[in-house]
């Protein structure tokens, strides 16, 4: 991930089509256009895994079906703990065979249709529920040296608990960290950077104008009419966190993409 | 091994409204989904086919739009799908529905095993699976939570009870209805969904299955719904978690995760 920071490579979130899409072909075409645009810009496409528990197609299967190119430094797959064991292994095998090496390992969100990995699926007996820590251990054990594994950090959770979890994630093999969206300087993230100077930290920039959607994540009510300029905030995050990478979530490909070109100088 | 899985399209919401005149569920304007229990029936059929060879055929009786559920069945890996759709089937109760499905199973021919979800979430009757067995005069096992063994002539299953399970061995051909504990249903793959969109689903009418018209639709349905009313208020059950704050938090987290709430 240091490569991305040194070379000013944005991590750009790309949402895959949902399983219940009524216009799947169109959604696949949109995905393909976005992915290709990210590749051509030299950025890294980060494909989510059933975000918010909404059943969606997996990044590797879309890449395969659409025959999209994989540049190893330019693709990251999110992987959460809501999969059947055989699906998990298929995703990992598929990533490995395609040369996808960056994985963001998260606990994730479930739903009625998304089965949770059982401890026995990841060959562990000392926990009651599989989290990103057990998934990290499993991948490192079963696929040694195949992937670069990152984890999420939430500065809005109780601080000591979050740091205790981060310690376990790092011990389990995490080598980079991506934060929840930041819209201003955050002292908990400052502490994180200081605590793990050798681990690359990527801060998430919220690119939607609808800032109030972040209310639940940050834990306080943001009024719906609050004005928010994502591009100015992005520039501010560069000034505040020059040593960090940047993950762009909910980036508007039509209205914002051309504006980010000169933001990382 | 030839396996038929019977599936049903149902309203997606639990707020389904009842037509006060007909006492039937109003389906217009409500998103339709595959009956959740049928996912387990499909998964079991696919797993048995993968293990023992043969084919899995999904069938459904319903309006034309029920083909969406059959496409879902194709997308997870069944080999064929057949829709039973005709105005004459409309208004069928569970007895008439199971008659139609049984006639379709007879027409498919040489079927070894029929698998149904334990019940549909709209009617909650759990009668169609047993009804099919009755019409075909085959043996059945309901509430199956595990298939333990299959031989060339029989199937051995565990039937779930509140206090444990029965082990039953029944000869082929047979009908089983399955509960959620039996497997973890797969999620459709992109390849499967794209293939399902191209699949041409045959539509069978009463004449195609040689159905006796006096046994289908409203005329063939002995059930008369004389009254419907909302269910009585249900008191939520409470589970008390005890221990140290850390233990309680951990237990609560586990409970919520196991229910896929978080």
Image (cartoon, grey):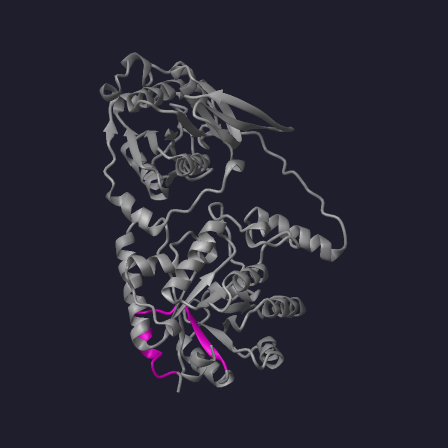
Looking at the magenta stretch, what is its main secondary structure?
A: loop
| Residue at 61% in and 66% down | A157
Give the total of numbered labels. 0
Residue toward you, A261 or B199: B199
**Vertical placement of A185 versus B237: above or below?**
below
Residue toward you, B112 or B62: B112
Horizontal and vertical percent position of residue A248: 42, 72
Horizontal and vertical percent position of residue B218: 33, 17
Q: Which residues are magenta?
A: A244-263
Horizontal and vertical percent position of residue B250: 67, 54
Picture quarter with the N terminus of chain B:
top left
Horizontal and vertical percent position of residue A7: 40, 83
Residue toward you, B179 or B44: B44
Instruction: Name the side, left or right, on which A175 lies relative to B222.
Output: right
> Is residue A51 on the magenta stretch?
no
Residue toward you, A226 or B65: B65
**Vertical placement of B195 versus A10: above or below?**
above
| Residue at 23% in and 19% down | B207
Picture quadrant where residue A257 is located = bottom left
> Is residue A249 on the magenta stretch?
yes
| Residue at 36% in and 18% down | B99
**Vertical placement of A137 versus A85: above or below?**
below
């Amino acid at each position: 991930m240091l490569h991305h920071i040194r070379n000013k490579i944005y991590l750009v979130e790309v949402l895959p089509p949902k399983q219940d899409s009524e216009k799947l072909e169109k959604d696949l075409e949109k995905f393909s256009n976005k992915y290709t645009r990210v590749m051509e810009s030299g950025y890294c496409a980060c494909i989510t895994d059933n975000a918010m528990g909404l059943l969606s197609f997996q990044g590797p299967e879309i890449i395969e079906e659409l025959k999209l190119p994989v540049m190893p430094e330019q693709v990251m797959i999110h992987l959460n703990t809501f999969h059947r064991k055989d699906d998990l292994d298929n995703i990992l095998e598929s990533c490995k065979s395609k040369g996808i090496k960056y994985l963001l390992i998260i606990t994730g969100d479930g739903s009625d249709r998304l089965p949770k990995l059982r401890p026995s699926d990841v060959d562990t007996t000392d926990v009651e529920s599989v989290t990103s820590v057990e998934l990290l251990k499993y991948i490192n054990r079963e696929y040694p040296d195949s992937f670069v594994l990152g984890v999420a950090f939430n500065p809005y959770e109780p601080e000591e608990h979050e740091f205790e979890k981060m310690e376990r994630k790092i011990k389990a093999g995490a080598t980079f960290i991506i934060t929840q969206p930041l819209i201003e300087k955050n002292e908990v993230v400052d502490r994180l950077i200081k605590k793990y100077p050798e681990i690359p930290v990527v801060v998430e920039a919220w690119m939607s104008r609808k800032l109030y959607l972040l209310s639940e994540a940050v834990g306080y009510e943001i009024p719906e009419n609050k004005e928010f300029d994502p591009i100015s905030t992005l520039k501010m995050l560069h000034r505040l966190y020059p040593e960090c990478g940047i993950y762009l979530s909910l980036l508007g490909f039509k209205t914002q993409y051309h504006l980010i070109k000169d933001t990382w100088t | 091994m030839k396996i038929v899985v019977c599936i049903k399209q149902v309203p997606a919401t639990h707020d389904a409204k009842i037509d006060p005149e007909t006492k039937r569920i109003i389906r217009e304007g409500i998103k339709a989904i595959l009956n959740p229990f049928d996912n387990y029936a499909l998964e079991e059929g696919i797993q048995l086919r993968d293990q023992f060879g043969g084919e899995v055929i999904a069938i459904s009786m319903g309006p034309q739009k029920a083909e969406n559920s059959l496409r879902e069945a194709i997308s997870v890996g069944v080999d064929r799908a057949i829709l039973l759709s005709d105005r004459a089937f409309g208004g069928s109760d569970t007895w008439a529905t199971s008659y139609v499905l049984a006639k379709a199973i007879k027409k498919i021919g040489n079927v070894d095993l029929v698998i149904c979800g334990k019940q549909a979430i709209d009617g909650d009757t759990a009668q169609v699976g047993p009804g099919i067995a009755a019409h075909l005069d085959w043996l059945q096992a309901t509430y199956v939570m595990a298939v333990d063994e299959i031989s060339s002539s029989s199937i051995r299953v565990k039937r779930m009870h509140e206090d444990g399970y029965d082990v039953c061995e029944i000869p082929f051909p047979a009908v089983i209805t399955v509960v959620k504990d039996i497997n973890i249903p797969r999620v459709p793959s992109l390849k499967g969904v794209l293939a399902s969109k191209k699949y041409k689903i045959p539509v069978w009418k009463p004449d195609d299955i040689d159905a006796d018209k006096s046994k289908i639709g409203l005329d063939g349905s002995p059930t008369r719904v004389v009254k419907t009313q909302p269910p009585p208020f249900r008191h939520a059950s409470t589970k008390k978690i005890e221990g140290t704050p850390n233990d309680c938090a951990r237990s609560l987290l586990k409970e919520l995760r196991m229910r896929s709430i978080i």
